[in-house]
Image (cartoon, grey):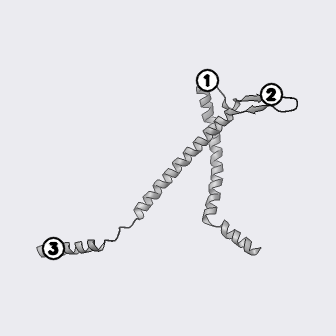
């Protein structure tokens, strides 16, 4: 049992697992922000542009109330709203990853050491230096 707990602790303390946990927590909070942006700002503006349509209320009743059964309702307005949520989140992640890759490329370019000269380049440099010495 102790060995299992030790292995779990080692697994949980790896950098990737901690990074993933932080990413999931931040992603959840970001999702709430985007949902609020879509629900409270974007969709009302789209509703105004489209003639006052409230997308959250758009639905089609497939099967009406029958006795004690609830009606079967197709809520396509909520689907449209969730698609807008997804597009905004996907675009935000795309921009973030693009910026991250740009910064990583700059770091790699700065950190790239100058390659060592080949043997033929060294010989050519020696010949050049000898020729310079002869001219002087």
Q: Nearer the viewer, mark 2 or mark 1?
A: 2
Q: Would you say the residues marked 2 and 1 are in contact, meaning their CB atoms lie under 8 Å apart?
A: no
The image shows residue 99 at horizontal and vertical percentages of 49, 51
Report the front residue among 48 and 3.
Answer: 3
Which sits earlier in the primary sequence, circle 3 or circle 1?
Answer: 1
In the picture of the structure, the residue carrying the numbered disc 2 is 64
Q: From the top left corner, tell me how far across and down residue 74 is, in percent.
A: 72, 32
Residue at image coords 71%, 73%:
6
Image coordinates for residue 136, horizontal then vertical, percent = 12, 74
| Comparing labels 3 and 1, the label whose residue is closer to the camera | 3
Left or right for 55, reference 99: right
Task: Classify mark 1: helix, strand or loop.
Answer: loop
Residue at 60 percent across and 35 percent down: it is: 42
| Mark identifier at residue 131 | 3
The percent coordinates of residue 46 (x first, y second) are: 60, 30
In this image, 85 relative to 126: left or right? right
């Amino acid at each position: 049992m102790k060995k299992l707990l030790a292995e779990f602790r080692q697994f949980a303390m790896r950098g990737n697992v901690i990074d993933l946990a932080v990413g999931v927590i931040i992603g959840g909070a970001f999702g709430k922000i985007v949902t609020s942006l879509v629900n409270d700002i974007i969709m009302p503006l789209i509703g105004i542009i489209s003639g006052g349509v409230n997308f959250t209320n758009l639905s089609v009743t497939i099967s009406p109330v029958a006795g004690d059964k609830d009606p079967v309702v197709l809520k396509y307005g909520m689907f449209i709203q969730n698609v807008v949520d997804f597009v905004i989140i996907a675009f935000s992640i795309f921009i973030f990853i693009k910026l991250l890759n740009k910064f990583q490329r700059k770091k790699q370019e700065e950190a790239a050491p100058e390659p060592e000269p080949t043997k033929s380049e060294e010989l050519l440099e020696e010949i050049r230096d000898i020729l310079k010495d002869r001219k002087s």
